[in-house]
Amino acid sequence: MRMESIIFQTIARQGLYVIMVFSFFLLGRGHNEPGGGFIGGLMTAAAIVIQYLAFDLEMVKKALPFDGKKLVALGLLFAVGTGLGTMLAYGIFMDHSFTHIILPFFGKVELTTAFLFDVGVYLVVVGGTVTIITAVGEEEPWNS
Amino acid sequence: MLLLAILLPFLAVFILPILAPILQRKLGWAIAVVPLFLFFYFASFLPQVAGGVPVIIDYQWVPQMGINFSIYLDGLALLFALVITGLGFFIVAYSVSYLGKEENLSNFYTFILLFMGSMLGVVTTGNLLVLYIFWELTSVSSFLLIGFWFHKEESRYGALKSMLITVFGGLAMLAGFIFIYLITGSFDLREILAQGGQLTGHVYYLPALILVLLGAFTKSAQFPFHIWLPNAMEAPTPVSAYLHSATMVKAGLYLLARMTPTLGGTPEWFSIVSGVGLVTLCYGSFMAVRQTDLKALLAFSTISQLGLITALFGFSTKLAMVAAVFHILNHATFKGALFMVVGIVDHETGTRDIRQLRGLGQYMPVTALVIGITAFSMAGIPLLSGFVSKEMFFAASLALPGVGIAQWLFPTMAVLGSIFTFLYSMMLVFNVFGGKPKANTNIIQPQGDHYGMLWPPIILATINIVIGIFPAVVQDLLVLPAAIGGYGEAISERLILWHGLGMPLLMSGIVIGVGYLLFMKQKSVIALVEGVQNHRFNLNVLYDRSLEWLNDSATWLTAKQMTGFLRDYMVFVMLWFILSVGGTLLYKGGLNLTTLDLSPVGPYELILALVLIAAAFGVALLPTRLAAILSLSSAGAVMFLFWINLRAPDLALTQLIVETVSTVLFLLAFAHLPELTKEIIPKSQKLINMAVAGASGLLITLLLISGNASRYYEPIADYYLQQSLPLGGGHNVVNVVLVDFRGFDTMGEITVIAIASLAVFALIKLRPGKRGSAK
């Protein structure tokens, strides 16, 4: 599935950073603007897919040495942990709360427990996609 | 704080991966801190609970369904909690010396902690459904522990057997709890206990009783459900000492104690529970005599002793309740020690075969003393704790309510079971540790007493002696409050060593006398037992055959249905969908083809719809696979444009990226598939496919139109639009709904994504006959 195109490889290499930043941006703004955990996660997954299309799987694995399965578990931990955390604090599972704090440069910033949950969603989506892509991608094609 | 204590074992699991590489073989010492701390923490509640004031704390969980995480810590719960944590400490400490360095210690202690937490949950919870959840968690952790050496076939078999039987009982128990809910209207233990004995007259009483008893009998290995316990001995010895002698199997007994005020006191309870208990007592001790594996002997001994306690719960008198609770405590101490000593023998000599072991007392005198004390306690020799509780057992069997055959049959069975208990206890001590070592065996010579493994059993044996001579030590703080907690009324029995010359003492005397005679003639007795066993119906064979039959039937049914073609499966699924959903729609008259509140349809929408239809047809009709995939992709892209048109940016973004990523995945997998060839499908098949496809399309259309037209309630969208900023703190309603209002659903969805990705990984990496290896 690899395309030996210098143009594509260059764009992929530079684009990775741009797309990653954009996906974090989408993750963070989800609560008030279009975005959120699923979309951010899929963006990151798309970035990784582009790497995989441009380069060899071995190179991608060396550059991004994380295990998709562990990400998935970590994401679920975040999500369930948010729920348990609020249960220990307030007595109800997943009773989200939010406050606003004033930061010097950014002004009024919102902090929510829902963001932690969204991070969990993000990690699961990224981890799940990476797992599937590497699992399928590592196999030899049928007729080779 | 109490909640945190109960959940502490579960939380401790999280630091295990951090500690394991640092501490390695010493990991057990760090883990042992957990039960030790919990033991003293629970002990701090003794004065309050013994004074008759149980600790009750409620946490709301799902109040609409009556599921609350309530804690109900009375004498009974506290006794169990102390046994679980106290013995847990000893077991973990013992395991440090017992387990070799090649074992997967972090897994082992994770499972042990999981079990400890679940068992604590079972005994401290005040809500029946939460009890069920923890009950099943103990089954799961027991499964993991029995199958710890999963490369051994026997371990896998034993783990599966224990799980199938106990989970079957657990489901029955859940059904029984639901019956109790239907009678009393509550899952809350306090409310159910407050209703006292009023349940027993209800028409649902008998089903509730039988189902709950099924749960208790399967978990506590009562006849005929005992068959899993001997196979569970495949687990490492610390596991056998902890779960399968002292704690997990006692969960069923806990259930019996808890349900006594509610379900007990009736003739049905009396006959079923006492009957099963006494039969198990005799059967277990009978079978134990002929066992050649020391652990198997102890397994049948456990089955028999659990039968004794079950019988006591069946008797339903105050004396019997005290005796039962007292024996739970005593049995935990002596059985735990016995298993640990057998583990020492196995560890030192390399074998557990009673025929090969002899004269070990010469090499391990202190060990011999320890096993002597604890085995004698089990056998009911005076001045040991087992004697006191056994005397009370005999006394309780004589003081039965009512008249009838039970008056003389039950004491007789009690004596009979105890005689054989005495016999195998003597065999355990004197055949293994007495006499002279055999010359022509190839067992390893022990190097002397191994104190690293021996100190926990020494402490437990000492407890046996102390309680045996001064039983009143545990009376007011432990045993009586537990009995009162179980029975529901005040009890004023006293635990004393000498009750005077009476029937119970005579019965004990008969046991010791006849037992000694049989011990002298043990070979004939063993031959007798073997002879009987070969003639009777073998339950293990029944279990194996049932599983085989189940597998064969399932294979037959699957073969009939699974033709191997995805297309056929689609037809089955679609057909069922059309029939069930469409049928309901027509049957309930839900078909409503009026149109309300439709968005205007302009040229853009029309063009997009036409392109969508063309793409759909393209998927079915295009000749090459690549073209078909791209056509599917373009259908998704059209959806993306629709979302933009309808001003839904979140959905549009998600659709676009999902479409892109899944197309890439498709094309990746595309490299692994053979070329599309033209298939020859019979005309009738084609017509069926077209009909099913057309019908499902029509059904969906009708559903959507009817759904839109049927306005039974206010649309919830208004609520979300109004409340998302004040309640959720966010302007993006879609996101707030996802993570906050419906956060629980999202948690379920990401769990599904997680499982799906793991399944893809497993299906690809672990398929048979592939090149490469899974990592």
Image: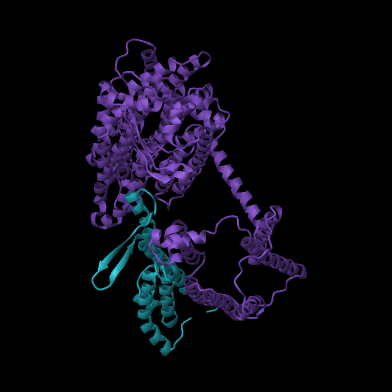
Left or right of residue B644: residue B110:
left
Coloring applied to the structure: by chain
Task: Pick the residue in front: B509 or A36.
Answer: A36
Q: Position of residue A15 (x, y in %)?
A: 38, 82
Left or right of residue B16: residue B655:
right
- Residue B701 visible somewhere in the drawing: yes
Please report the residue visible at 33 percent of the width from the left and 21 percent of the height from the top.
Answer: B388
Query: Looking at the rendering, in which quadrant would you find the C terminus of chain B?
Result: bottom left
Task: Pick the residue in front: A139 or B741.
Answer: B741
Task: Pick the residue in front: B332 or B768.
Answer: B332
Residue B475 occupies quadrant = top left
Residue A73 occupies quadrant = bottom left
Query: Looking at the rendering, in which quadrant would you find the N terminus of chain B?
Result: top left
Q: Height in image: B556 above or below B228? A: below
Q: Height in image: B387 above or below B21? A: above
Q: Position of residue B580 (x, y in %)?
A: 67, 55
Q: Colour of chain A?
A: cyan
Q: Which chain is purple?
A: B
Q: Position of residue B484 (x, y in %)?
A: 36, 25
Left or right of residue B38: residue B314:
right
Q: Position of residue A76 (x, y in %)?
A: 40, 60
Residue that extends furthest to the top in the rendered view of this protein: B501
